[in-house]
Amino acid sequence: MDGRNCKRRIDLQKIILSKSQKKILLDHSHKEEPNESCAILYGDKNNETYTVKEIWLTENIDSSPVEFTLSPEQTLEMHQKEKEMNLEIIGIFHSHPNSEAYPSNTDKKFMENNSYVWIIYSGMNKNFKAYVLESGISEIPIQN
């Protein structure tokens, strides 16, 4: 080491989600209770900052309080929307109606194949948290 204070790259990452966007996700979560809600977040990435520009509310075809799945049709449409809007898929949102805003074992498995920012809303604690998977699960800040 050369003595400099080096931050891990993960410490520099953040996602920008406005108050109005949080309200859209919160309303969607409440509408879908007692099941998990889900949405796709589109935007852009500049250096280590992800900025949400558009939200696409999706249907949880599992109708489950502990898991969510998009239909094959929604998955296809998700990628079509990305091209149409000329924005990147930067995040996946879902709610945990009765648990912490922390990735479950199932979430962790899907994070391995979907390297986006994962935002989780806890219906229990009423908070939003964001995570990325690099060498492990790391929380990143959400800014308005």
Image (tube, grey):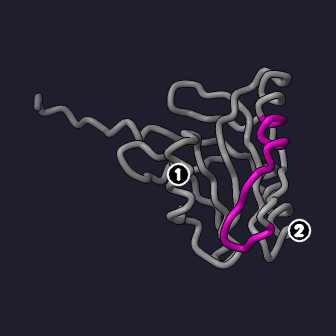
40, 113: nearer the viewer: 113
User: On screen, 80 above or below 62?
Assistant: above
**What SS does tag 1 mark?**
strand
- List x then y, in percent, for residue 35: 78, 71
- List x then y, in percent, for residue 89: 69, 34
Q: Residue at x 82, y 28 (%)?
A: 80
- List x then y, in percent, for residue 68: 71, 60
Residue 71 counted in the magenta span:
yes
Q: Residue at x 51, y 31 (%)?
A: 48
> Quick one: quadrant of the N terminus?
top left
Residue 37, image quadrant? bottom right
Q: Earlier in the sequence, mark 1 or mark 2?
A: 2
Residue 75, image quadrant? top right
Q: Start and end of the magenta stretch?
A: 63-78
User: On screen, 99 above or below 2?
Assistant: below
Which residue lies under the disc numbered 2?
A: 31
User: On screen, 81 above or below 132?
Assistant: above
Q: How dense is the environment of label 2, judged by Cα within 10 Å: few (below 14), some, or many (20 and up)?
A: few
Which residue lies under the disc numbered 1?
A: 131
